[in-house]
Amino acid sequence: MPGASSAQSTPFRSHDASASSARSPQTMDNAHPIPIVQEPGPHKAPTSDKRRNHSRAETVNRIMNVALASIGLMLAAPIMLIFAVLVKLTSPGPIFYTQARVGLDRRRASRGPRDYDRRTRDLGGRPFMILKFRTMRMGAEKNGAVWAAMRDSRVTAVGRIMRKYRIDEFPQLLNVLRGDMNIVGPRPERPSIFSRLCDDIAEYPLRQRARPGITGWAQVNQAYDTSLDDVRNKVRLDLEYLEHQGVAEDLMIMARTVPVMIFRRGGW
């Protein structure tokens, strides 16, 4: 019938409401919904994956530090024994010197530098007792903590030799085995000096994102601190190290530490 044919073809010519109401049930049953495709957004690794990767890297780093510290202690044991005897024979007081230092701040270590909040800078990090050969006479800091200077009268004769060759730092291999330090990392500072430096240098607390070390990028590039400008430069070098921190970087710094010790670069 002409009417029927016209009604049948209407849905293909017009999309108004009257034409839609004229569709047959069979036509409606054969209609398929238009699929909606959502464009993928930028890929973000799940937080659990990031934590797992970070934990794996920490485990590898810890194994390397324990292994190298153990080997270092075995190799350095004869030298350490000789200087332990010399310290005892040449000056009154203990052989070893322990001092509180500011260590890793795990709250800051889990965040990037952009997440750093200046209001939390006084938190510092986890304190620990650092172990060194005693290089100064007893009561050297009875008037308060001060930086050592070249030809410092407080330093003993044996202590001067140890400081030149960095032998006084050897006992810190035990700090590495205890987990207080790594072989490579920013040098730890005393809490009182740490607090003052945080006031003077805004970036200073960022160093606590890494475990402190016996040697570091700052130590192989600069001598002992004698002024605030020296500290500022070392902070810059420490932050450079944090940007490239890894096993390869640590091994390179360890290799560069050897000539610093042998040729007495920066030691006094």
Image: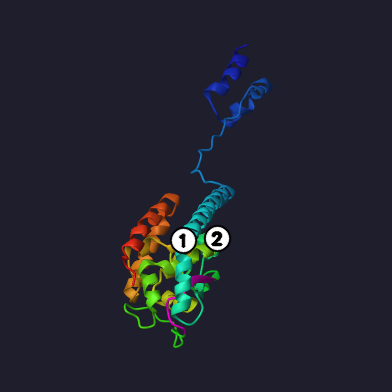
Crowd around label 1: few <14 · some 14–19 · many ≥20 (10 Å): some
Q: Residue at x 53, y 53 (%)?
A: 58
* Residue identified by numbered label 1: 76
Q: Position of residue 64 (x, y in %)?
A: 51, 52
* Residue identified by numbered label 2: 177
Q: Residue at x 45, y 68 (%)?
A: 82
Amino acid carrying mark 2 in the image: Leu
Q: Position of residue 248 (x, y in %)?
A: 42, 49
Residue 236 occupies which quadrant of the picture?
bottom left
Check the image and name the residue furthest to the top: 1
Q: Residue at x 54, y 34 (%)?
A: 37
Amino acid carrying mark 1 in the image: Ala
Check the image and name the residue furthest to the right: 25
What segment is highlighted magenta in the picture?
A: 129-138
Mark before the other along the chain sequence, 2 or 1: 1
Residue 29 occupies which quadrant of the picture?
top right
